């Protein structure tokens, strides 16, 4: 039999780095107890995930585990495990999902410019304007930043197709390809975030990181009047079938950028803090 872990690595090669690591972790743990695929029944998978729940794992982790086992089962043609959605439902009211309010977001541009390393300003610009996920910033390569045409190609963190955005004039002074000469791990990105957080003096909150900026930017753009049907594809969120059909008539990506930039509350902040810098 081929190595199941190697098989799942190949199967997940196009997924985001965090997803690959999570699925492999759960698959490895499952294989310790069920090395023989002939014993991979739906009941075995469900028992494995229920055991995780009883050990205190969060519902979101249990959901990741069942998805990992479905991927493993699919590779080997085993009957797919199913679990009632309510069994591992996430209590969204009790989730810790911090979002930086607008007044704190407005502190980040100047704070990033106080750092002795220019990479932090570049990361902060992309985060506060486009709401990029930490992994998307960390995976950005120099070749994906086209300053000549004022475009950035974003490798979507959730494994979907890359999206291309226009680069607004306000942040051009802090963007250089050499700032993205190497990939950065999630540990690296947390270190960059903590440095920015300290310089900005924003309150520390549980699980607060680059995604708190993404959530804050989303709320700020909604409050500024950007329509949801524009914001959803612009932020790189997945689409349901119904939404996909609805979006066949949407305007081109450049016009999405134009709509968002016209209402973006952080662009004037970048313009002000950078002044005449070019």
Image (cartoon, rainbow, N blue to C red):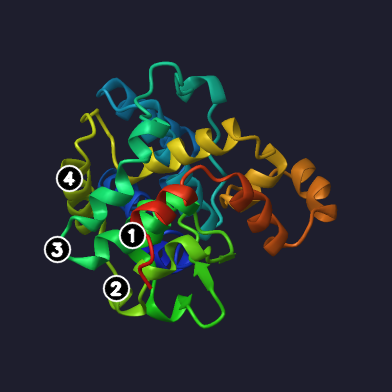
Q: Earlier in the sequence, mark 3 or mark 2?
A: 3
Please report whichever mark, 2 or 1, sits nearer to the chain's N-terminal start. 1
Secondary structure of the residue carrying numbered label 2: helix
Circle on res. 199:
4
- Residues under numbered marks 3 and 4 in contact, where contact means CB atoms less than 8 Å apart: no
Mark 4 or mark 2, which has the lower sequence index? 2
Asked whether the beta carbons under mark 2 and mark 1 sit within 8 Å of each other, the answer is yes
- Give me the C-alpha separation between circle 3 and circle 4: 11 Å
First in sequence, mark 1 or 4: give its number: 1
Q: Is residue 171 above or below residue 261?
A: below
* Most foreground residue, 147 or 184: 147
- Is tag 1's residue or tag 3's residue first in the polypeptide sequence? 3
In this rendering, position of residue 102 left or right of residue 83: left
> Is mark 3 in CB contact (under 8 Å) with mark 2?
no
What label sits on residue 39 in the rendered view?
none
Q: At x 57% / y 80%, what residue is drawn?
A: 149
Q: Position of residue 263 (x, y in %)?
A: 61, 44
The circle drawn on residue 116 is: 3
The image quadrant of residue 8 is bottom left
Which type of secondary structure does the marked residue at label 3 adopt?
loop
Cα–Cα span, label 1 and label 3: 14 Å
- Label 3 neighbourhood size at 10 Å, few (<14), some (14-19), many (20+)? few
Dot in front, 4 or 2: 4
In which quadrant of the rendered view does residue 102 lie? Answer: top left
Q: Which mark is residue 123?
A: 1
Q: Which residue is mark 2?
A: 179
Q: Quadrant of the N terminus?
A: bottom left
């Amino acid at each position: 039999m081929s190595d199941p872990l190697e098989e799942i690595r190949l199967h997940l090669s196009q997924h985001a780095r965090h997803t690959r690591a999570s699925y492999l972790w759960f698959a490895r743990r499952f294989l310790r107890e069920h090395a023989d695929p002939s014993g991979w029944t739906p009941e075995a998978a469900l028992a494995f995930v229920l055991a995780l729940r009883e050990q205190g794992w969060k519902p979101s982790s249990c959901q990741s585990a069942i998805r990992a086992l479905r991927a493993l089962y699919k590779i080997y043609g085993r009957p797919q495990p199913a679990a009632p959605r309510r069994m591992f439902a996430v209590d969204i009211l009790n989730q810790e999902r911090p979002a930086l309010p607008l007044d704190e977001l407005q502190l980040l541009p100047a704070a990033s410019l106080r750092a002795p390393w220019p990479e932090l300003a570049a990361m902060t610009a992309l985060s506060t304007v486009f709401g990029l996920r930490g992994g998307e910033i960390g995976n950005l390569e120099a070749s994906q930043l086209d300053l000549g045409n004022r475009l950035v190609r974003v490798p979507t963190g959730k494994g979907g197709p890359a999206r291309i955005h226009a680069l607004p004039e306000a942040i051009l002074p802090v963007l250089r390809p050499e700032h993205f000469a190497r990939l950065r791990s999630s540990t690296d990105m947390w270190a960059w975030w903590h440095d920015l957080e300290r310089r900005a003096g924003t309150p520390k909150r549980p699980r607060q990181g680059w995604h708190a900026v993404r959530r804050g930017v989303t709320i700020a753009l909604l409050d500024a009047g950007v329509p949801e049907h524009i914001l959803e594809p612009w932020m790189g969120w997945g689409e349901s079938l119904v939404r996909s059909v609805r979006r066949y008539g949407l305007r081109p990506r450049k016009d999405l950028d134009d709509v968002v930039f016209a209402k973006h509350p952080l662009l004037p902040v970048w313009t002000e803090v950078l002044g005449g810098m070019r």
